[in-house]
Every structure is written in structure tokens, then in C-alpha cells.
Image: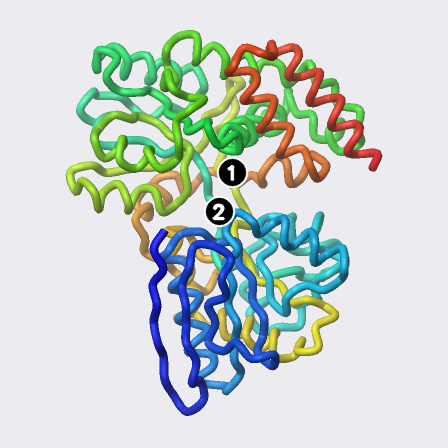
Amino acid sequence: MKKIIRTFTGILMGAMVLTACGGESTGSGSSSNALSLYSGVSEDAEKEAIEEIAVAFTEETGISVDVNFPGTGYEDQMRVRMASNDLPDLFDTHGWAINRYGEYTADLSDMDWVEYFDEAMAPILRDEEGKVYAFPINQAKDGIMYNATLLDEYGIDLPTTFDEWVGAMETVKEKSDGEVAPLWIPGSNQYTIAQVLDQLSTPLLVTDENNSFEEELLDGSFDWSNYTPLAEFLKELQEQGLLNTDVLTASEAQRIELMAQNKIAFAFAGGAFGPAVTELNPDIQVGTFPVPAYWEGDEPSWIGGERNTFAAFKDSEKLDEAKQFIEFLAQPENAKKLAEAASLPAGITNVETENYYTEFYDKWAHIQIQPYFDRVYLPSGMWDVYATTGQELLADTLTAEQVSAEMESEYLRLRNQ
């Protein structure tokens, strides 16, 4: 992808900022005295917002910030740096503030912005002793993206249950004569399949009080045959022609263009998806709705919590400066800018945002946010198992029962590591 080069001048900065999609640093200062900052964000708008705020911080304080966006290599770089206890001064915990990065993060509970801590984020950003592990620059509120223009044309009401969702997909298939993919998954990247399975695990296994396995999942006694219906569900969608036929070879790069061409009804995608589609085709409106309920009598769920954050490395030689930068990020105008760049709600309660999905978030404001399933109930490493077993299921190399058996085996192995 292209590199955008911007030059910023000033008495306090005198530095060049490089914006890149790969691992290059893009800082308001690149000297050894600069704060090192690593972020896992991937969208250009989000990168630019972080860079601009870093530049403004340097102008105000004289403290340089070396901004880095490693892209798909982010987690690998962080694992290497954790192994040597040599993390950046500031880094994104991307959903794993406590479970993965907890021992490396400074406690932020004494900072001013904590007065506006959103309690919905507590399970994944604050522990029982009150330690706050990171500052959330936005708040994930994942559901299912949909072509609002197409559903309106076909007279399809938004589903609140799995059965209604399947019915909606069948209507799309029928009314489009098979020209529109009811559910489109770019499965050449196996982690997009993991995303689907992870989000759908919550209504199957957690939210319904009569079918909740929270305790068993947490204590290791979960019977993984209870996961089999989800694998069966995904396979049935494929067999009924409700998934794109190229599900195993389709790429994420195609998704925006196909939605803009009115070729997709439902998709699992990030916040920047809708604005990108409408930019290509202003006649297409992308909406979002919470994940439907699996069990009769249950409610739909938003899936989310922590999306992107900044934590401070507890052993940083510039810890005070790192905390100063986080406090700067939390200023309402900066927090608003960061959240809106991602088309997501802000992570603190004193900031109101306006973004592409505001009307949809408002419509479903009564729906609770559930934390990402794997981050609460599964050991580290299970995301890869979700991905590989899901891909093999769709490739007909594993049955639904074999998927559950593999999930159980890896779940137990990873818990015991």
C-alpha cells in the first residue's frame, strides 16, 4: 500500500512523520529520547488520528513520540518483546490488557480520566484490586454488518434470533436469484472465520440463563459437545447456499467493493467498513445490528469491550511521560477524534461521538455489550484453533463433531501450559 509522507516543522519538533501500513515508525520524533509507541490499528484514518495527536502532544510538551504501526506483525513483535521484558513505552493491548499484557502494564487508576471510566469495560480493563490496565481509545460494539439499502428494498426486517437471521438470508437468496451472497466471509484469511465463530459463541453458550456454561468454561470442565451446534450451523449455511461459494478463497480486499456493488447482504466487518462502502457508492447504506439470540426467549447481544488501547510499560524509563501522553489522549477533543476515526463509541463516558453508525447504535442502545468470548472464557492461543478448525470445517476436512473434539483437546492443552 502507498506510503504517505508528511513533514511537520516547529521549534519543538523538527521531525518527519512517515505514515505506513507496515512496520515503519511514524513518529513526531525518532531520537532515542522519544517515547516509543506501538499500535495495532490498521485503518489509515485511525493511524492519522494517532499521528496528529502525537504531533500536538509534542508541540505542547516538547516530548517527542516515535509512532509505530507494525500491521499484521504486531502480535508477533509484542510476544518477542514480552519475552525479553523490553516493551515500548506505550502499546496497544488490543483486547488482552489483563490476560496477556497484565504483568507488563503500569497501573493507571490514579489518573484523572479514570473518573469517566465506562463500567462496561471493567471486566477486561480493571481487576478486583482496582488496577486499571490501559486507556481505551475506542469501544468495540460488534454485531453483524448489513446492506441496509438492500434489506429495505426486499422488505426484510432485522432479525433478533438465529432462525429469523436464516430466514432473512433465504429471502435474499430467493429475491436476488442467487446474485447476492446472503452472508459473505473472506475465508482466505482464516481469522475472519474465527471472528464469526467467536461472536456467535456468546449467544450459544453464555447469554441464555438456561443454557449458560460460564462456570464450566472458566473452571475447565466444559463439555465441548455443546459447541457442536455452532459448527453445524456454519456448515448448514454453506450447504444451503447462504454463504459465498468462494468462502475459502475470497479475500478481505473484495468485501468493500462487492458490498458497494449490492452483492452482499450480511458480513462481519470492522467499523471502517461502512464509510468505505458508501464512499465507493453513496447509494449504499451499511448498517449494523447486534448478534441474534440462539435460544428462544434470549435477547440479542453486542459483542465488544476493549478494541484499541494505550497501556504504559511499567518498567519504562519514561513512565511519567508515557502517563502524560495518555492523559493527553483522554482530553475530550482528542478522545473524540480517536473514536470517530474508527467509527466507534469512545471508551470514556464524558465523550459523545458522532459517527457513521450512530443511528444504529442508538436504535439498539438497550442491548447489553458482552465481552469477546475468547478473551474471557478461553486460554490464550484458542483464537488460532477457532480459525483452523473453522476453515477445515468449510473445506470438508473436519465434521462438526471433529471440530468440537479438536477445540476441546486444544482448550485443555492450552489451559495446562
- Three-letter amino acid code at disc 2? Ala
Res 379 → quadrant: top right
Q: Mark 2 to mark 1: distance in Å? A: 7 Å
For label 2, the SS is strand
Task: Say which of 106 and 77 sits in front.
Answer: 77
Q: Which label was assigned to residue 140? A: 2
Q: Residue furthest right?
A: 416
If the image is split into quadrants, where does the C terminus sit?
top right
Left or right, 98 with reference to 413: left
Q: Residue furthest bottom?
A: 11
Residues at badges 2 and 1 in contact (C-beta under 8 Å)?
A: yes
Q: Position of residue 415 (x, y in %)?
A: 79, 34
Q: Position of residue 30 (x, y in %)?
A: 52, 76
Left or right, 188 with reference to 275: right
Residue at left 64%, top 67%?
312
Task: Say which of 109 and 389 sits in front.
Answer: 389
Q: Which label was assigned to residue 254? A: none
Q: Position of residue 37 (x, y in %)?
A: 56, 67
Residue at left 34%, top 55%?
2
Residue at left 20%, top 20%?
154
Q: Is residue 120 visible?
A: no
Q: Position of residue 143 (x, y in %)?
A: 44, 35
Task: Say which of 274 and 62 sits in front.
Answer: 62
Residue at left 55%, top 12%?
232
Badge 1 is on which residue?
303
Left or right, 247 with reference to 83: left
